[in-house]
Image (cartoon, rainbow, N blue to C red):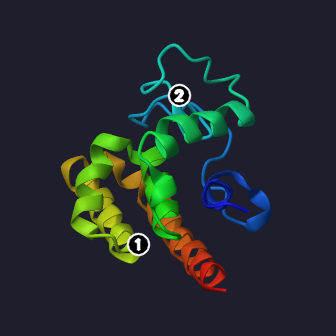
Amino acid sequence: MNSFQISVQFLIDPRDGYATEGGYANDPNDPGGETNYGISKRSYPDLDIKNLSLSNAISIYKRDYWDANSLDTVPLPLCIVMLDGYVNHGPRVMKPLIAAAKGNWKALIQERIKFYLRLIQRNPQMSIYKKGWLNRMNQLNKFCTIAEIYNET
């Protein structure tokens, strides 16, 4: 299994108990709006989000997030945290978080937690997502710890 496949496994494979990017959602409180597998209407206005297939979502992950950010050159498990962040936050948000983390995957998770908490501080209505966001970061930490061990063997 290559780094991209391992990274995508965190996003969409329910067999591992993670699968952070589920199916279709159209939460009126979510700034991303209509989403499917983490792909938002806001980012892809011309895409039929409701009928987006898993294979098309994976193609978008690969083309627009993995390849566009040269994640093949990033070691495991940092590339997992980066791909998840690019899908969840978008490249504009992720670039300063990545710079602040200085190549450390655990620090990048902490930067992402700080980002979520700042979002809530600026807009308290976003606190409805806090538990889910923090759970995602805890699951990401567990998954990356396993990936780091796997990568060392």
- In the displayed structure, does residue 71 sit left or right of residue 25? left
Q: Residue at x 45, y 62 (%)?
A: 74
Q: Residue at x 39, y 46 (%)?
A: 89
Q: Residue at x 51, y 13 (%)?
A: 46
Quick one: 45 or 99, which is closer to the camera? 99
Quick one: 56 or 25, which is closer to the camera? 56
According to the picture, the residue beneath numbered tag 1 turns out to be 105
Q: Residue at x 68, y 39 (%)?
A: 23
Q: Is residue 54 above or below residue 121?
A: above
Mark 2 to mark 1: distance in Å? 29 Å
| Mark 1: amino acid | Trp
Q: Is residue 23 above or below residue 20?
A: above
On-image quarter of the C terminus = bottom right
Residue 53 percent coordinates (x, y): 73, 30
| Mark 2: amino acid | Glu
Q: Is residue 9 above or below residue 146?
A: above
Residue 107 percent coordinates (x, y): 33, 74
- In the displayed structure, does residue 100 sit left or right of residue 153? left
